[in-house]
């Protein structure tokens, strides 16, 4: 994983910094609700977190959802947390562009006790067309993402409607 053009390696972390992180972990309020925790981590990582989650549709266990790059799995987390019977692996594919989004998607998996992270795909908006064969292996019922007014890069009438003609597209 690249961090500002450099490889991220634990060997680069000093013992003093690791000790400082461990001290900080002990101070964390672990009783925070999962959705609040994920929002806090999104803000910490600089991933947009202001979304109208309530505008998302009801997702049922037979539905498939693609989360577009830009949100790091926050929408999948919200849906899986609020709709019984949903599983990250069975119901969601989360496309991430940056290391920050990938990190957040990993935290989503941890928070929901996901046994695997194979539902996370690295693909930025410009790469979605190149990896659409991968994304199109599943027929999606919903494609969810960040609204253009909040920093999202897709418009409903643009590429998304062409790439996913049978899906309900929700940008929040």
Image (cartoon, helix red, strand yellow):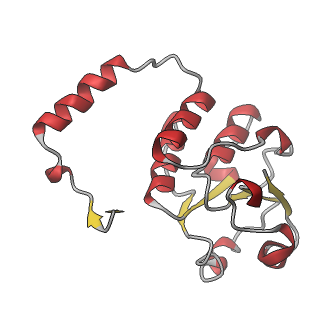
Residue 14 image offset from top left, x and y in percent? 13, 43
34 and 138: which one is in front?
A: 34
Tally of marks: 0
Q: Visible in this render: residue 112?
A: no
Residue at the outermost left position: 15
Q: Which residue is drawn at 68% across and 33% down?
A: 81
Q: x%, y% of residue 16?
A: 12, 34
Answer with left or right where residue 73 lies relative to residue 110.
right
Residue at the bottom extreme of this rendering: 130
**For this rendering, which residue is in front, 101 or 76?**
101
Whether residue 143 is situated above or below residue 43 in the rendered picture: below
| Position of residue 64 in the picture relative to residue 24 (left or right) | right
Q: Quadrant of residue 1?
A: bottom left
Instruction: Find residue 52 and report its horizontal and vertical position in percent.
Output: 78, 42
The location of residue 72, given as percent across then percent down, is: 57, 52
Residue 149 lies in what quarter of the image?
bottom right
Residue at point 31%, 68% (across, down): 5
Residue 75 in sight: yes
Relative to 26, is 137 above or below?
Answer: below
User: Residue shown at 53%/40% (left/top)?
Assistant: 43
**Vertical arrangement, residue 153 with respect to residue 23, above or below:** below
Instruction: Report the residue that reaches farthest toward the front.
Output: 149
């Amino acid at each position: 994983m690249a961090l500002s053009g450099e490889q991220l390696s634990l060997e680069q972390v000093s013992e003093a910094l690791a000790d400082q992180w461990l001290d900080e972990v002990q101070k964390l309020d672990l009783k925070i609700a999962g959705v609040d925790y994920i929002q806090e981590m999104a803000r910490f990582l600089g991933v947009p977190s202001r979304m109208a989650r309530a505008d998302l549709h009801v997702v049922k266990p037979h539905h498939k959802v693609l989360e577009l790059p830009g949100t790091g799995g926050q929408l999948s987390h919200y849906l899986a947390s609020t709709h019984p019977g949903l599983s990250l692996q069975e119901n969601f594919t989360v496309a991430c562009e940056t290391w920050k989004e990938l990190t957040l998607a990993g935290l989503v998996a941890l928070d929901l006790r996901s046994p695997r992270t194979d539902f996370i795909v690295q693909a930025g908006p410009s790469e979605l067309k190149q990896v659409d064969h991968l994304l199109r292996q599943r027929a999606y019922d919903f494609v969810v993402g960040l609204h253009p007014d909040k920093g999202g890069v897709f418009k409903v009438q643009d590429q998304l409607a062409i790439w996913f003609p049978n899906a309900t597209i929700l940008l929040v």
